[in-house]
Image (cartoon, rainbow, N blue to C red):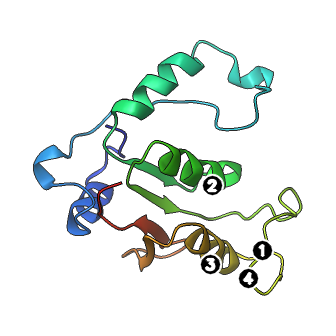
Amino acid sequence: MIIPSHDKSRKWLTKLNVIPAAHVRAFDVLQCWFGSSHRPEEFASDHFVDDSVLEEKLKSCSVIVGLHPDRATGSVQEVALKYGKPYMIVPCCVFYREFPDRVLANMKPVTTCEDLCEYLLSRDLNSTRMKLDFSGANQAIVSLPFQR
């Protein structure tokens, strides 16, 4: 199971019925590369899992959470959808210059965190937005519980 180890995130996940409270346990940090097939040198160390380990973890986890995942925001959602896993993403930085193909339905480029939330919602009709109970980047995109 891949979820944050601090109580606040676990409370939100169970409150949303993303996963039952009895199944929520902390995890060891799993560092991985969600980018392109070319892995930068800094992601090739022993601290990062290799692709086969990552694949197995993704197949067996119960939920995928991306807390301020920066450039991996879209990839976290794509991976969750690919493996049929519920997810929660709390986006912050947009990196709009690096993702010029991200556009809203009205063809407006995604340039703000608000835009990014709308973009993520548009890619998964079984998702919703919620405001987390803290200041700062506190908008979460959450897949609604359903059988995938």
Q: What residue sits 50% from the left and 51% below the top?
A: 81
Sequence order check, earlier mark of 4 and 3: 4
- Residue 110 screen position, x and y as percent: 77, 74
* Callout 3 crowding tier (Cα within 10 Å): few <14, some 14–19, many ≥20: some
Q: Residue furthest bottom?
A: 106
Q: Quadrant of the N terminus?
A: top left
* Callout 2 crowding tier (Cα within 10 Å): few <14, some 14–19, many ≥20: many
| Element on which disc 1 rests | loop
Q: What residue sits 30% from the left and 62% below the top?
A: 146
Q: According to the image, label 2 marks what residue?
A: 73
Q: Amino acid at mark 1?
A: Val
Q: What residue sits 36% from the left and 76% below the top?
A: 133
Q: How many marks?
A: 4
Sequence order check, earlier mark of 4 and 2: 2
Task: State the CA–CA distance, disc 4 to disc 2.
Answer: 19 Å
Q: Are marks 1 and 3 in contact (CB under 8 Å)?
A: yes
Sequence order check, earlier mark of 4 and 1: 4
From this view, report whether residue 134 is shown above or below residue 101.
below
Q: According to the image, label 1 marks what residue?
A: 110
